[in-house]
Image (cartoon, helix red, strand yellow):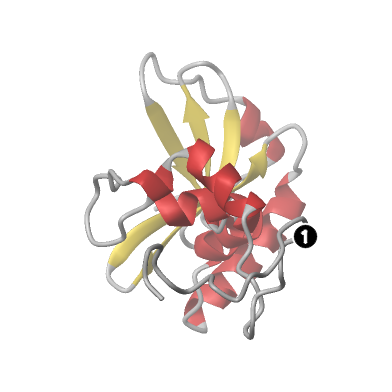
Amino acid sequence: MARKLTDTLIRSPEPPATGQRVVWDGAVPRFGLRLAAGGSRAWVVKYKVRGRSRWLTLGTYPLLKLTDARAKAKKALAKVVQGEDPAAERRAANAPAPDYAAIFSPTLLLSRNLRSARPRRCWTSRPATLELAGAFRASPPGPRPRREGRQSTGQEGRRPGRA
């Protein structure tokens, strides 16, 4: 049976030569102190979510005291009982926001073939083509305006040599 962790018991165990070892607490189930080969000590909680075993690191020993670590462990285990995953919540909170400007840039959308992993090889995916396409805009519907410097003879639509 695991003994209740105290400050003297936390300082006394030597770290393992290789790997990690956990000293479990007798007061709070699935809560303990992880000793690493390098000498670091971290508070951990082990729990299961949907049949998978998970570890949640609460903090390091000198910075987080035993009483504060026990309180955090009890809160985390209460979330597990309610069906939540505390480690998944932490990962979601620390995940960077997606860069939508890079995802939906016009160049990327034109050059990607969404049906295959290979980019499409066509003239519309070239950067020079995109610059030219931006310079030419579609004219509004309706009759075209007359170009200046040209006089109308009334014979524009006819072939030469015919009356």
Residue 141, compared with residue 110, is above or below; it is: below
Residue 59, compared with residue 40, is above or below; it is: below
Q: Residue at x 27, y 70 (%)?
A: 51
Seen from the viewer's position, the closer of residues 142 and 30 is 142
> On the picture, is 132 further left or further right than 69?
left
Q: Residue at x 41, y 49 (%)?
A: 124
Q: Quadrant of residue 43?
A: top right
Q: What crowding class fits label 1: few (fewer than 14 Cα within 10 Å), some (14-19), or many (20 or more)?
A: few
Q: Quadrant of the C terminus?
A: bottom left
Q: Residue at x 65, y 75 (%)?
A: 144
Q: Residue at x 24, y 45 (%)?
A: 118
The kind of residue tagged 1 is Glu
Residue 66, compared with residue 81, is above or below; it is: above
Residue 52: percent from left, percent from top: 30, 63
Residue 3: percent from left, percent from top: 51, 49
Seen from the viewer's position, the closer of residues 37 and 49 is 49
Seen from the viewer's position, the closer of residues 5 and 56 is 56
Give the tally of numbered discs: 1
Give the SS element for disc 1.
loop
Let me know if residue 95 appears in the view: no
Query: Where is mark 1, residue-wise?
Result: 148
> On the picture, is 44 further left or further right than 148?
left
Seen from the viewer's position, the closer of residues 111 and 152 is 152
Residue 108: percent from left, percent from top: 48, 50
Let me know if residue 124 appears in the view: yes
Q: Quadrant of residue 145?
A: bottom right
